[in-house]
Amino acid sequence: MQKEPNEMMKLNDLIQVCRDAYQGYWQAAAEIEDKSFRKLFREKALERNDFACDLREIAFKAGLNPEKEGTFSGKVHRTWMNLRHQIHPHKDSVILMECRRGEEHSLGVYQDVFENNWLAEIRPQLEKQFVTMIEMRDLLTKSTDDIGKPDTTGSLLHL
Protein backbone atom coordinates (compact mmCIF):
# COMPACT_ATOMS: atom_id res chain seq x y z
CA MET A 1 0.00 0.00 0.00
CA GLN A 2 1.82 3.07 -1.30
CA LYS A 3 0.73 6.26 0.42
CA GLU A 4 1.39 9.96 0.05
CA PRO A 5 3.31 11.58 2.93
CA ASN A 6 0.15 13.46 3.98
CA GLU A 7 -1.79 10.20 4.10
CA MET A 8 0.90 8.62 6.24
CA MET A 9 0.75 11.58 8.61
CA LYS A 10 -3.04 11.32 8.77
CA LEU A 11 -2.90 7.59 9.47
CA ASN A 12 -0.52 8.35 12.31
CA ASP A 13 -2.89 11.10 13.52
CA LEU A 14 -5.75 8.59 13.62
CA ILE A 15 -3.63 6.12 15.58
CA GLN A 16 -2.67 8.80 18.07
CA VAL A 17 -6.23 10.05 18.52
CA CYS A 18 -7.37 6.48 19.21
CA ARG A 19 -4.56 6.10 21.75
CA ASP A 20 -5.62 9.38 23.35
CA ALA A 21 -9.21 8.13 23.55
CA TYR A 22 -8.07 4.84 25.06
CA GLN A 23 -6.10 6.62 27.77
CA GLY A 24 -8.80 9.23 28.34
CA TYR A 25 -11.63 6.73 28.71
CA TRP A 26 -9.51 4.58 31.01
CA GLN A 27 -8.83 7.60 33.21
CA ALA A 28 -12.50 8.61 33.14
CA ALA A 29 -13.53 5.09 34.17
CA ALA A 30 -11.24 5.34 37.18
CA GLU A 31 -12.68 8.70 38.26
CA ILE A 32 -16.41 8.46 37.56
CA GLU A 33 -18.80 7.39 40.31
CA ASP A 34 -21.65 6.15 38.11
CA LYS A 35 -21.13 2.40 37.71
CA SER A 36 -22.83 2.16 34.32
CA PHE A 37 -20.59 4.89 32.88
CA ARG A 38 -17.56 3.30 34.54
CA LYS A 39 -18.33 0.05 32.71
CA LEU A 40 -19.06 1.88 29.43
CA PHE A 41 -15.84 3.90 29.64
CA ARG A 42 -13.79 0.74 30.20
CA GLU A 43 -15.47 -0.84 27.18
CA LYS A 44 -14.83 2.27 25.08
CA ALA A 45 -11.20 2.38 26.22
CA LEU A 46 -10.67 -1.20 25.05
CA GLU A 47 -12.54 -0.51 21.81
CA ARG A 48 -10.33 2.52 21.06
CA ASN A 49 -7.25 0.47 21.82
CA ASP A 50 -8.49 -2.08 19.27
CA PHE A 51 -8.99 0.76 16.75
CA ALA A 52 -5.42 1.93 17.34
CA CYS A 53 -4.03 -1.61 17.02
CA ASP A 54 -5.90 -2.19 13.76
CA LEU A 55 -4.61 1.09 12.33
CA ARG A 56 -1.07 0.36 13.54
CA GLU A 57 -1.17 -2.95 11.70
CA ILE A 58 -2.16 -1.13 8.51
CA ALA A 59 0.67 1.35 9.08
CA PHE A 60 3.21 -1.44 9.60
CA LYS A 61 2.09 -3.11 6.37
CA ALA A 62 2.63 0.23 4.61
CA GLY A 63 6.18 0.40 5.96
CA LEU A 64 5.45 3.01 8.63
CA ASN A 65 6.63 2.92 12.20
CA PRO A 66 3.70 4.71 13.86
CA GLU A 67 3.78 6.47 17.20
CA LYS A 68 3.09 4.26 20.19
CA GLU A 69 1.69 7.00 22.37
CA GLY A 70 -1.07 9.54 22.04
CA THR A 71 -0.55 13.20 21.31
CA PHE A 72 0.78 15.97 23.51
CA SER A 73 -2.63 17.67 23.32
CA GLY A 74 -4.22 14.42 24.51
CA LYS A 75 -1.91 14.37 27.50
CA VAL A 76 -2.80 17.98 28.23
CA HIS A 77 -6.51 17.14 27.99
CA ARG A 78 -6.14 14.22 30.41
CA THR A 79 -4.17 16.45 32.79
CA TRP A 80 -6.98 19.02 32.54
CA MET A 81 -9.54 16.28 33.24
CA ASN A 82 -7.56 15.24 36.30
CA LEU A 83 -7.26 18.83 37.52
CA ARG A 84 -10.98 19.46 37.07
CA HIS A 85 -11.69 16.21 38.88
CA GLN A 86 -9.46 17.31 41.77
CA ILE A 87 -11.29 20.65 41.99
CA HIS A 88 -14.72 19.00 41.74
CA PRO A 89 -14.22 15.45 43.05
CA HIS A 90 -17.02 13.00 42.45
CA LYS A 91 -18.60 15.35 39.95
CA ASP A 92 -19.57 12.95 37.19
CA SER A 93 -20.89 15.81 35.07
CA VAL A 94 -17.35 17.21 34.73
CA ILE A 95 -16.03 13.86 33.56
CA LEU A 96 -18.88 13.41 31.08
CA MET A 97 -18.35 16.88 29.62
CA GLU A 98 -14.61 16.27 29.19
CA CYS A 99 -15.23 12.90 27.55
CA ARG A 100 -17.64 14.62 25.17
CA ARG A 101 -14.98 17.21 24.29
CA GLY A 102 -12.45 14.46 23.64
CA GLU A 103 -14.90 12.57 21.45
CA GLU A 104 -15.65 15.70 19.42
CA HIS A 105 -11.93 16.21 18.86
CA SER A 106 -11.54 12.61 17.66
CA LEU A 107 -14.43 13.04 15.25
CA GLY A 108 -12.78 16.16 13.85
CA VAL A 109 -9.60 14.25 13.02
CA TYR A 110 -11.59 11.54 11.23
CA GLN A 111 -13.71 14.16 9.44
CA ASP A 112 -10.56 15.81 8.09
CA VAL A 113 -9.44 12.47 6.61
CA PHE A 114 -12.84 11.97 4.96
CA GLU A 115 -13.09 15.52 3.60
CA ASN A 116 -9.65 15.27 1.99
CA ASN A 117 -10.35 11.76 0.68
CA TRP A 118 -7.24 10.38 2.33
CA LEU A 119 -6.79 6.68 3.08
CA ALA A 120 -9.53 5.72 0.61
CA GLU A 121 -8.63 2.00 0.61
CA ILE A 122 -9.38 1.71 4.33
CA ARG A 123 -12.32 4.10 4.32
CA PRO A 124 -14.92 1.39 5.14
CA GLN A 125 -12.99 0.50 8.30
CA LEU A 126 -12.58 4.17 9.22
CA GLU A 127 -16.30 4.78 8.65
CA LYS A 128 -17.20 1.97 11.06
CA GLN A 129 -14.94 3.51 13.69
CA PHE A 130 -16.38 6.95 12.96
CA VAL A 131 -19.97 5.75 13.39
CA THR A 132 -19.07 4.21 16.74
CA MET A 133 -17.55 7.52 17.81
CA ILE A 134 -20.63 9.45 16.69
CA GLU A 135 -22.86 7.14 18.72
CA MET A 136 -20.70 7.69 21.80
CA ARG A 137 -20.59 11.45 21.25
CA ASP A 138 -24.38 11.48 20.94
CA LEU A 139 -24.76 9.51 24.17
CA LEU A 140 -22.42 11.92 25.94
CA THR A 141 -24.26 14.89 24.45
CA LYS A 142 -27.58 13.54 25.68
CA SER A 143 -26.05 12.91 29.11
CA THR A 144 -24.59 16.42 29.35
CA ASP A 145 -27.35 18.50 27.71
CA ASP A 146 -28.96 19.40 31.02
CA ILE A 147 -25.73 20.19 32.83
CA GLY A 148 -25.57 23.83 33.80
CA LYS A 149 -29.21 24.51 33.02
CA PRO A 150 -31.42 25.79 35.82
CA ASP A 151 -33.73 23.24 37.38
CA THR A 152 -37.11 23.73 35.73
CA THR A 153 -38.84 20.79 37.37
CA GLY A 154 -40.33 23.09 40.01
CA SER A 155 -40.60 22.54 43.69
CA LEU A 156 -42.87 23.45 46.54
CA LEU A 157 -40.40 26.14 47.59
CA HIS A 158 -41.17 28.12 44.44
CA LEU A 159 -44.94 28.26 44.92
Image (cartoon, rainbow, N blue to C red):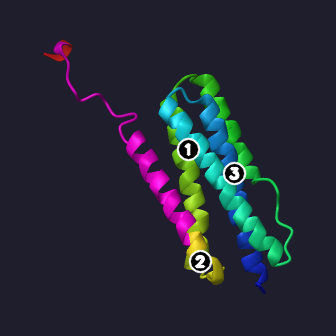
Q: Predominant secondary structure in magenta?
A: helix
What's the residue at 81%, 79% (across, down)? 62
Rate crowding at label 2 as few (under 14), some (14 to 19) or many (20 or more) other CA atoms within 10 Å: some
Q: Which quadrant is the N terminus positioned in?
A: bottom right
Q: Which residue is mark 1?
A: 99
Q: What's the amino acid at mark 2?
A: Arg
What's the residue at 46%, 45% (across, down)? 140
* Above or below for 108 versus 72: below
Asked whether 36 or 15 is in front, the reply is 36
What's the residue at 54%, 71% (across, down)? 127
Taking the magenta stretch, the answer to whether it contains residue 151 is: yes
Q: Quadrant of residue 56?
A: bottom right
Q: Which residue is mark 3?
A: 20
Q: Which mark is residue 123?
A: 2
Please say whether residue 77 is visible from this viewpoint: no
Element at badge 3?
helix
Q: Is residue 90 left or right of residue 59?
A: left
Taking the magenta stretch, the answer to whether it contains residue 111 is: no
Q: Which residues are magenta?
A: 127-156
Q: What's the amino acid at mark 3?
A: Asp
Q: CA distance from mark 3 to mark 2?
A: 21 Å
Q: What's the amino acid at mark 1?
A: Cys
Please say whether residue 42 is visible from this viewpoint: yes
Rate crowding at label 3 as few (under 14), some (14 to 19) or many (20 or more) other CA atoms within 10 Å: many
Report the number of numbered marks.
Answer: 3
